[in-house]
Image (cartoon, rainbow, N blue to C red):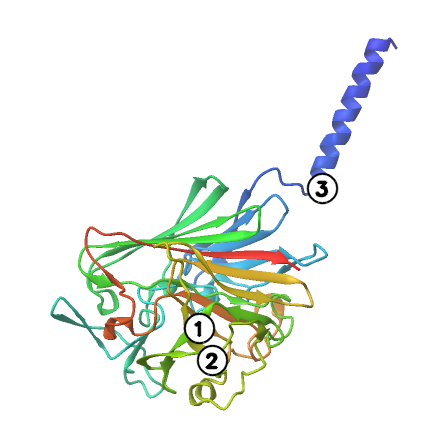
Amino acid sequence: MTAVTQKLLYRVKTALVLLTTAIALPTYAATQLIEEPWGALKDGTAITRYTLVNTSGARVSFIPAGAAIVALEVPDRSGKLADVVLGYDTAAEYLEGNNPYMGLTVGRYASRIFGTTLKLDGEEFTLTSQLQRDGTPSNVVLHGGPDGFSHRVWAPQIIATDDGPALRFSLVSPDGDQGFPGEMNVSVTYTWTDANALIVDYSATTTKPTVVNLTQHSYFNLAGAGNGDVLAHTLQINADFFTFALPDNRPTGEILTVKDTPFDFTSPKPIGRDIDADDAQMRANRGYNQNFVLRRSTMPDAVAEAAVLHDAASGRVLTVSTTEPGLFLYSGNFLDTQRLMKGGVRYVPRAGVALETGHFPDSPNLPHFPRTTLLPGDTFTSRTVFAFSTR
């Protein structure tokens, strides 16, 4: 064997070793997109699950049903990945009526509109409200109505961004949908960065004056979904005021200071510290179900830090930033503790916390609250960033 042949064989063997190593080790040179079948809805509609994997291997998964986040795996302080959002094992469960909006994109109006009418430009529109237990219509339209955006199958599209591939889900809401005026074209775009930040961008246009308020309704448990409750998680909310609400969650229009109330999260405190406080609205809701008035940047439409959630045991930190004026805190007070959830586990009470960015509840009926009206020719845009890190 000549020296030239030996060198050639050496190079071939080296190349084979490198190739084998590359196959064996899950390295990520850039953000990757994985598409896989994920069952079907009850009507037979096939569902694809889309997963964005960044360069460190952290990943987030979505489905078109409800434009939902179904998994979000981020590292703890030792680098171990865990899924930190609550959810289900099948696509069909996300659109079932007993899903408490887990992982879903919510609209046309997230949160509550009280009464069944909406007045715009002197015209009155009758909205579709949820039914009460006795089958009669309630006096509140929750999260856009009983067949809101969260219960639709959105159209998926893979798009390119500076941070790599992203997912855009789009929806056309017809004029009169749930009673709301105007045909609305709406989209939500999810971008997953190498810094473990999930950027959520909303956009909407309308053919008639209408109202819009969109949010992401994931429940977070930084210890890992199904790993106990979130009462020991510390939470800080950059809000000095909250919108006062009656026990039935109807805002009175009053904006009150959080000082000397259980709603004071201006400094980090455990979610469980005041969750059983002697407060009428807290008692009625078995815990937090409250909107906060965020401190805003002096720059219009700037993304400002809204809240920081921390789990000391795992070291995981979630920092929520947004262009929106409000943050709605819901501590999972009525989660079903008997149902089998993802991974075949049952969740304990308060197994996750929702941090819903958006406008204030019942803003269309309270003129001094920030406006939610969208006019033809204008484009509604909003951004929220869920950034994960460790301490």
Q: Is residue 208 above or below residue 23?
A: below
Residue 30 placement: quadrant: top right
Q: Which residue is mark 1?
A: 240
Q: Tag 2's secondary structure? A: loop
SS of the residue under disc 1: strand
> CA separation, marks 3 and 2?
52 Å
Residue 78's spot in the image, x, y percent? 72, 56
Q: Amino acid at mark 3?
A: Leu
Q: Is residue 123 above or below residue 191?
A: below
SS at badge 3: loop
Question: Which is nearer the N-term, disc 3 or disc 2?
Answer: 3
Direction from residue 122 to residue 368 in the image, left or right: right
Please, what is the three-letter code of the amino acid marked with disc 1?
A: Asp
Observer-side mark, 3 or 1, equals: 1
The answer to the question of whether label 3 and label 1 lie on touching residues, with beta carbons closer than 8 A, is no
Choose between 292 and 59: the one closer to the eye: 292
Q: Which mark is residue 263?
A: none
Q: Which residue is mark 2?
A: 259
* Residue 203 image point, x, y percent: 33, 53
For disc 3, the marked residue is 25
Left of 86 or right of it: where is 99? Answer: left
Would you say 341 lies left or right of 371 here?
right
Q: Is residue 209 above or below residue 251?
A: above
